[in-house]
Amino acid sequence: MNKNNAALLCLSLVAASLSAPVLSQDWVPSRYGADDRIGAANNLSTDIVVDAARLITTGKVYSLGVETAEDSPAYGTRTFTIDIIASGANVPVGTDVVTSNDERVTTSFGIGSQIDGLGHLGIGNQYYNGLTSEQIVADGGLSELGTHTIPPIVTRGVLLDMTAHFGVDMVSEGTAFNRAEIEAAASAQGIQIRSGDVVLFHTGWMQLLGTDNQRFISVQPGVGVEGAEYLADLGVVAIGADTPALEVIPFENPQRVFAVHQTLLAKEGVYILESMNTAELAADSVHEFMFVLGQPKFKGAVQTVINPIAIR
């Protein structure tokens, strides 16, 4: 899939979400109850926070976000621009000769490192817990399932190094991570994935960022549908990778576009973390750590730019 095809695919998904009929009245019920709006974040707890804090042994802090810039690769019509607004053309003010700068940003929040909220992707105009487009989409943003409602995510983070699993520097595009691959990688690292975890995959794919942006965003290794279902069943809160869409592209079934997004967001209420900078964690052979994310509270956003922190 080249960049143009990826853009057309995203545009067609947007068009379909506006016009497609509801597929079925028998929606996938949430395991967290008919009124739930935060999905797998229900699996977080104070005990998990305390246990995650015990993983800190060196105090080293890792930034998992990448810069968002005007030349960042982006799907479809997503863009980012920033302009600096100087105060009075920086004419000094007052006896202290005060000058200042502000910024004006025009952007999609789906560029660079980001979290996909539960209102981002649906199936036949139905989203997490059966909510329809009519119920969640409003002029001022999402009235339900907006990313501003996601609670702070402080938990154990797990890094599965798929480059080590496959014995390569960068995993090939189209390589799917399903239950067998996930269990093998976790076992080799001595890791047991638990409810409440955030699971990140290191593929080496971010080596392409800034050198071959077209390939970076058009194809990638990633999670397969069975792998997504397996991790969701374990109760993980979020799944991420150092790739721009998390899931494997080309898709396992060409007729089922973004089937992993469907599984995680719409059916299971599991958050997706994209373009995570996992290279330093992998280089230090860090397989579990304290994961901290307090996303910006832009009311009604469907996704938002983030910079999660890992602490070992």
Image: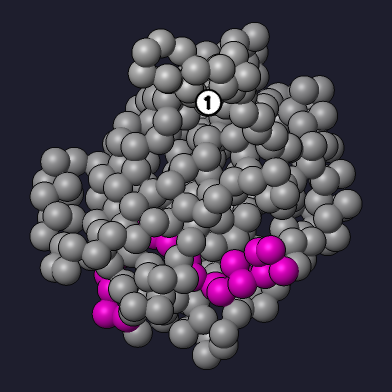
Q: Which residue is mark 1?
A: 101
The residue sitting at the front extreme is: 95
> Is residue 156 or residue 175 the one in the foreground?
156
Q: Position of residue 286 (x, y in %)?
A: 31, 73
| Quarter the N terminus occupies | bottom right
Q: Position of residue 213 (x, y in %)?
A: 74, 61
Element type at mark 1 = strand
Image quadrant assignment for residue 176: bottom right
Mark 1 residue crowding within 10 angstroms, few (<14) / some (14–19) / many (20+) = few
Residue 261 visible in the snapshot: no
Q: Residue at x 59, y 67 (%)?
A: 206
Q: Position of residue 27 (x, y in %)?
A: 56, 31
Question: Magenta part of the protein: which range?
Answer: 189-211
Q: Amino acid at mark 1?
A: Asn
Q: How is the image coloured?
A: one colour
Q: Is 195 in the magenta? A: yes
| Quarter the C terminus occupies | bottom left
Q: Main secondary structure of the magenta part?
A: loop
> Is residue 146 or residue 36 the one in the foreground?
146
